[in-house]
Amino acid sequence: MPESRSNDSVRGPGKALALLSRLAELEETQTAATLDQRDMARQRTETTASLAKYSSRTAENADKQTGLAQERTALTREQTRLSTRSSELASIRTDLAHERTSQAEQRTQLATQRTEMAHRRTGLAEFRSKLAEQRTVLARERNGLSVQRVQLAEQRTRLAESRTVMSQQRNGLADFRTGLARQRTATAVTRTRLSLQRTELARGRTFLALIRTGLAFLTLGLTFLRYFGISKWTFFDAALVVCSLVAVYFGFRGYRRALLSERRLESLLAADGGLAEALSWQGFPAQDPGKTGDLIKTGTGYPAG
């Protein structure tokens, strides 16, 4: 549309110049016709013979003049139309100039924006370069941390192996401690039973001493009765014999109870394996649990002290 308007603006002045030259030609032709008319009028006065010819020439000239007037009117109208068109083209050209100016301003603004975007792009490129450098530094740090992680993993593996070995040693020590605890418990039970047996043996020895004392006093009372006979000391001798018999009775009864308790403890010690271990710790040869009772009976299973 702007190109067609510019073509019209170019063709309009050329066409107007052609019409003006045509109008000038028509005026010159009219001037020449007027001169011819004058010549013909002069000739008419000169000769009557050429009147008809002059009249016809006049009529022709009038027709030509009328045609030229009509053509001039048409040319004037065309000139007016062309002037109006030229004004329109001038206004269009002005509008185009304004549009071109606005487009130039827009182009300038776009150039400014493009420059700003270029600056921003440059800033973003620099920022991207900085980010790339930071990423490189972080990648190096990550590689260092990876190496440290691998080293720590290897160290952890070695520590895990050491911990496994120590755990096995600890389990062995725990088992050994458990065995020692069991041995200590068995030894404590055995020691308690031996203490009870020693107590029962002491009670048996006490009752045997009571029996021995009763028998001694019984012998003494019978000796007094036999030696002195019936006398004023017979009541004392009889009381001595009766007390001796009572002492012997209680002595036999207590010794029997102590002997039963000692045999019961002897059977428990015979079935106890802690005594054999205790004997082996004291430097005696190891014995079967079934033979421990024989050692207790004979007294060879204890140290001399």
Image (cartoon, rainbow, N blue to C red):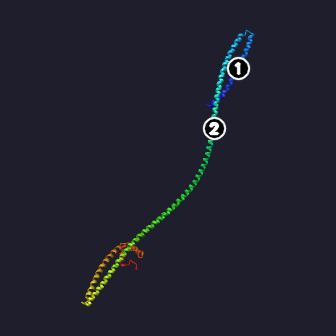
Residue 200's x, y, as percent?
A: 34, 77
Q: Classify residue 276 as left or right of residue 39.
A: left
Residue 182's x, y, as percent?
A: 40, 69
Q: Residue at x 51, y 62 (%)?
A: 159
**94 over 126 or under it: above or below:** above
For badge 2, the amino acid type reads Glu
Where, by quadrant of the figure, is residue 304 drawn?
A: bottom left
Q: Neighbour class for label 2 at 10 Å: few (<14), some, many (≥20)? A: few
**294 over 96 or under it: above or below:** below
Q: Using the image as rendered, state which of residue 260 and residue 296 is in the foreground.
A: 260
Q: Neighbour class for label 1 at 10 Å: few (<14), some, many (≥20)? A: some
Residue 216's x, y, as percent?
A: 30, 85
**Secondary structure of residue under mark 1:** helix
Where, by quadrant of the figure, is residue 95 drawn?
A: top right
The reply to whether the C-beta atoms of the residues labelled 1 and 2 are less than 8 Å apart is no
Q: Which residue in the protein does label 1 denote?
A: 27
Q: CA distance from mark 1 to mark 2?
A: 51 Å
First in residue order: circle 1 vs circle 2: 1
Q: Residue at x 63, y 34 (%)?
A: 98
Q: Which residue in the protein does label 2 denote?
A: 105
Q: Residue at x 40, y 74 (%)?
A: 278
**18 over 128 or under it: above or below:** above
Q: Using the image as rendered, state which of residue 109 and residue 184 is in the foreground.
A: 109
Where, by quadrant of the figure, is residue 96 drawn?
A: top right
Q: Is residue 217 visible?
A: yes
For badge 1, the amino acid type reads Glu
